[in-house]
């Protein structure tokens, strides 16, 4: 049996959030959906809570698959497993600590099929403990700009979760997530999807709620993984551009590499990590350092000249200033 839409949900350590997520999925106004949950070796009771919520929606139960991995394999493996089991013509990924509006699938599907598009996009709402922030995801009017705008990642957001995408895009060999990538994995896929897309449409509504206060999230603190995945992302991106002979200014790519390094070094508390990865893009960073914000520029300048403690002190002062300015 095949479905129009497959909703894919990796599950790991989300006990406090998964019930809200699953309720939002099973309450969708669109009916022709299969739900695939991948238990990525979660150590908590997330799966037990999933099963309890399923009992409240007997009409959805026949359309639900729960796949259990023997151990925690990471986001990329869990997503690839979900894709292998998906039968839908279109795929939507939802993070298990987030939730969606009840008409999200219906609105995206309607716009996508009406326009015979490859990807349908909506806006997001970032949820913080005391406030919310509306995030607009802009789609370029010109197909030729899709790749460039996505890789710049300024107005075109690289989130995977707010996009309904043709299944065949995920089946392309160069659109499969390498094992071990669980940071920048969305951006890894989106630059490729936007390159292959012939038409992308937009629903101008905030339909996806992105939770920003989950301390277990991959993006909540900086570790060795973030640095390694950043290096892998840019290595693979360079390879993709080269193999497809994509016409994009090399200065744009180099500037983005330096910016990604500056963001990481501004966010890490670890002197050890700063020393270990100081070599990242070292040969090009001084050429593009002027494009950075003052604080990031100062941190990267000190790091470049191996003044790690000064870089660390600068970071602490900037974070103290930012906390006290709100």
Image (tube, rainbow, N blue to C red):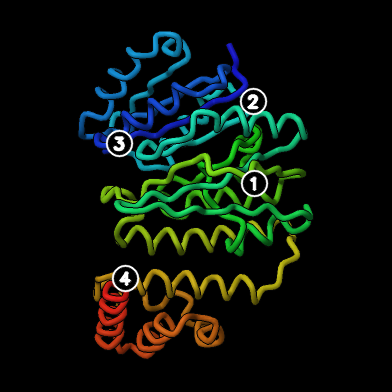
Q: Quadrant of the C terminus?
A: bottom left
Q: x%, y% of residue 43? A: 21, 34
Q: Which residue is mark 4?
A: 326
Secondary structure under tag 3 reads loop
Q: Secondary structure at mark 4?
A: loop
**160 relative to 99, above or below:** below
The residue closer to the viewer here, 252 or 110, is: 110
3D distance between C-alphas at marks 2 and 4: 46 Å
Dots 2, 4 in contact, CB < 8 A: no
> Which marked residue is nearer to the observer: mark 3 or mark 2?
3
If the image is split into quadrants, where does the N terminus sit?
top right
In the displayed structure, does residue 103 sit left or right of residue 247?
A: left
Distance, label 2 to label 1, CA atoms, is: 15 Å
Quadrant housing residue 152: bottom right
The tag earlier along the polypeptide, 2 or 4, is 2
> Local crowd at mark 1 within 10 Å, few (<14), some, or many (≥20)?
many
**Quick check: 162 above or below 148?**
above
**Which numbered tag is attached to residue 17?**
3
- Using a 10 Å C-alpha cutoff, classify the residue at mark 3 as few (fewer than 14 neighbours), some (14 to 19) or many (20 or more): some
Q: Mark 3 and 1 residues: CB-CB less than 8 Å, in contact?
A: no
- Where 69 sits versus 175, above or below? above
Residue at 38 percent across and 21 percent down: it is 66
Residues under numbered marks 3 and 2 in contact, where contact means CB atoms less than 8 Å apart: no
Labels 4 and 3: the sequence-earlier one: 3
| Residue placed most toward the observer, 113 or 204 | 204
Mark positioned earlier in the residue sequence (3 or 2): 3
Q: What residue sits right under mark 2 in the picture?
A: 89
Q: CA distance from mark 4 to mark 1?
A: 38 Å
Residue denoted by label 1: 193
In the rendered image, residue 287, in percent from the top left (x then y), is placed at 56, 87
Q: Position of residue 209 (x, y in %)?
A: 44, 42
Q: Which-is-in-front pick, marks 3 and 1?
A: 3
């Amino acid at each position: 049996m095949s479905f129009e839409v497959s909703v894919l949900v990796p599950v790991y350590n989300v006990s406090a959030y998964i019930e809200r997520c699953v309720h939002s999925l099973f309450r969708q106004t669109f009916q022709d959906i299969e739900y695939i949950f991948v238990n990525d070796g979660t150590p908590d009771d997330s799966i037990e809570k999933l099963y309890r919520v399923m009992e409240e929606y007997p009409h959805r139960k026949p359309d639900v698959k729960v796949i259990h991995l023997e151990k925690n394999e990471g986001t990329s493996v869990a997503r690839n497993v979900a894709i292998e089991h998906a039968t839908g013509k279109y795929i939507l990924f939802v993070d298990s600590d987030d939730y969606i509006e009840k008409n999200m699938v219906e609105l995206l599907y309607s716009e996508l099929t009406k326009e015979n598009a490859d990807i349908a996009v909506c806006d997001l709402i970032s949820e913080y403990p005391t406030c919310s922030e509306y995030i607009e995801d802009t789609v370029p009017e010109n197909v030729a700009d899709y790749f460039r705008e996505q890789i710049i990642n300024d107005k075109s957001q690289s989130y995977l979760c707010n996009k309904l995408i043709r299944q065949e895009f995920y089946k392309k060999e160069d659109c499969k997530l390498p094992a071990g990538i669980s940071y920048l994995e969305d951006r890894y896929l989106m630059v490729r999807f936007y390159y292959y897309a012939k038409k992308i449409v937009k629903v101008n509504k905030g339909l996806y709620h992105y939770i920003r206060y989950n301390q277990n999230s991959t993006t909540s603190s900086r570790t060795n993984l973030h640095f390694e995945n950043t290096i892998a992302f840019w290595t693979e991106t360079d390879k993709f551009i080269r193999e497809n002979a994509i016409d994009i200014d090399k200065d744009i790519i180099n500037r983005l590499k330096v910016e990604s390094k500056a963001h990481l070094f501004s966010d890490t508390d670890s002197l050890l990590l700063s020393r270990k990865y100081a070599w990242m893009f070292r040969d090009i960073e001084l050429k593009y350092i002027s494009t950075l914000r003052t604080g990031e520029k100062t941190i990267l300048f000190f790091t470049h000249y191996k003044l790690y403690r000064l870089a660390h002190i600068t970071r602490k002062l900037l974070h103290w200033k930012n906390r006290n300015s709100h």
